[in-house]
Amino acid sequence: MGADAPGLSPATISRLKQDWEQDYQNWTRRDLSGKRYAYVWADGIYSTVRMDDRLCLLVIIGSDETGRKELLALSDGYRESEASWTEVLTDLKQRGLKGAPKLAVGDGALGFWKAVTQCWPDTDQQRCWVHKIANVMEKLPKAMQPKVKEALHNIWQAETREKAYKAFDNCIERFSPKYPKAMECLAKDKDSMLAFYDYPAENWQHIRTTNPVESVFATVRLRTAKTKNCGSRMTTLTMAFKLMEVAQKKWFRLRGYKLLADVMQGVKFVNGVKQNGDRKQVAA
């Protein structure tokens, strides 16, 4: 908190809160013109700070063409509705973010994907594998979960899209007779689950899941769990912002970040391999 917070008296804390709220307000109005992002990760995080008014924090983290991640948006919304996400994306565009990201990564929340289709129609969509596996597991008896999880692992760890499709079909054929609901949950997002094959293989570990959001928000969840029933909407937003602002200083670049310039320029990748006309490299 710095040298200006000795003793942490109630008056000091009150003053700090006012300063932090102003920091958050300034951050939400910052100019984004000239910014470009290759990937964005989005998630809706529910806060239990106010039990009588559950707050849904809408979070977007972006990675620019140098591989550096930054907190792009942090707002509150009505659940994860299309209207709430559309408001967030529209605000980014109004503050100067003209170019749409190449790939958006998120869970199965339909509100976010409808908003992306409307605001960023050219952006590819990648469903989070961690969320998808959890959704499938919920529809299975515990005794079967290890076998199905292994089959799902064979899909997203396949070296090529063709092998992934084969593993996908084998999984559905194998388990559909006994567990149709679980396999229906898997099959409905088949194409968007495998969008990562059109991007550099070095980036796959980053873009198959929403882990950049989930891992950072572990700190926020830890703090909100300790402050139940004592925070307003603005206090919760400010606290989350300041915690993520501090965490952001320690974020590492994406693995394979040198290839992001090619991604931004629209260079084609097939099964994670750059297509530049060199037949020997493509064959390799």
Image (cartoon, grey):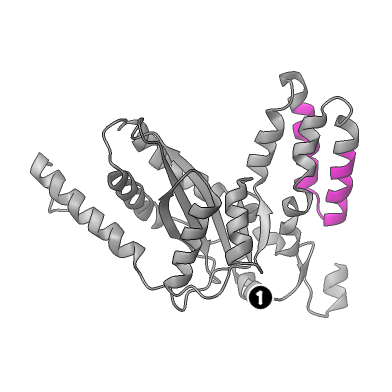
Per the image, is 163 magenta?
yes
Is 265 rendered above or below residue 270? Answer: below
The answer to whether one can see residue 255 in this image is no
Decide if residue 267 is on the left or right side of residue 100: right
Q: How many marks?
A: 1
Instruction: Examine the image and state in which quarter residue 218 appears.
Output: top left
Q: Which residue position is annotated with label 1?
A: 262
Between residue 115 and residue 236, name the one nearer to us.
115
Between residue 236 and residue 79, name the one nearer to us.
79
Per the image, is 197 magenta?
no
Is 93 rendered above or below residue 17? Answer: below
Q: Amino acid at mark 1?
A: Asp
Is 195 rendered above or below residue 129? Answer: below
- Element at label 1: helix
The answer to whether one can see residue 219 in this image is yes
Q: Quadrant of the C terminus?
A: bottom right
For image coordinates 73% across by 58% down, the residue present is 195
Q: Position of residue 187 (x, y in %)?
A: 80, 43
Q: Position of residue 80 (x, y in %)?
A: 52, 46
Q: Position of residue 121 (x, y in %)?
A: 65, 67
Instruction: Examine the image and state in which quarter residue 176 appears.
Output: top right
Decide if residue 124 is on the left or right side of residue 147: left
Is 149 rendered above or below residue 249? Answer: above
Between residue 218 and residue 283, name the one nearer to us.
218
Read off the magenta span: 146-170
Q: Position of residue 108 (x, y in %)?
A: 64, 45
For image coordinates 36% across by 47% down, the residue present is 240
What secondary structure is the magenta-colored segment mainly?
helix
